[in-house]
Image (cartoon, rainbow, N blue to C red):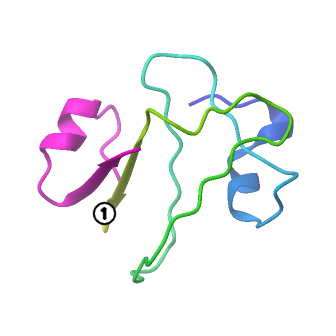
Amino acid sequence: TRVTPTYVAENAADADKQNYALTTEEYQARWEMNLNNQINIEKINIWNRLSETDETANFWVHVSQDPFTSGATLADILADPNIESKFV
């Protein structure tokens, strides 16, 4: 997914609500994060940008112990029994 330079993916994990990451408006745009370790995830917080309309609905959150396959479609990810998926 392409992002504008100011809103890079790293901003999404820095705990600063003034920073954020954006995907471009494209079909099934996605953002991925590798935690580099296997950890227990108790909660995922997703905040909307403070100055924009609410865009925090109608999207998928996928969690996997393994990196996602390059070029995998949403259907591929949803069909994979090793990926936990939740529609928000």
Asked if 34 appears above or below 2 in the picture, the reply is below
Quadrant of the drawing holding the N terminus: top right
Instruction: Please tell me whether residue 52 belongs to the stretch shown in magenta.
Output: no
Estimate how packed mark 1 is, as few (under 14), some (14 to 19) or many (20 or more) residues with alpha carbons within 10 Å. few
Find the magenta span and give its range: 67-88
Residue farthest along the top direction in this orientation = 26
Q: What residue sits right under mark 1 in the picture?
A: 66
Residue 3 as seen in the image, left or right of residue 30? right
Instruction: Give me the residue at 67% from left, 51% from top.
Output: 47
Quarter-of-image position of residue 73 = top left
Residue 26 picture location, percent across and down: 53, 16
Quadrant of the drawing holding the C terminus: top left
Residue 68 as seen in the image, left or right of residue 16? left
Q: Secondary structure at mark 1?
A: loop
Three-letter code, disc 1:
Asp
Residue 81 picture location, percent across and down: 11, 56
Residue 47 as seen in the image, left or right of residue 52? left
Front residue (pair 37, 13) = 13
Residue 88 as seen in the image, left or right of residue 55? left
Asked if 2 appears above or below 34 in the picture, the reply is above
Front residue (pair 53, 8) = 53
Residue 75 picture location, percent across and down: 20, 31
Instruction: Give me the residue at 76% from left, 54% from top.
Output: 11
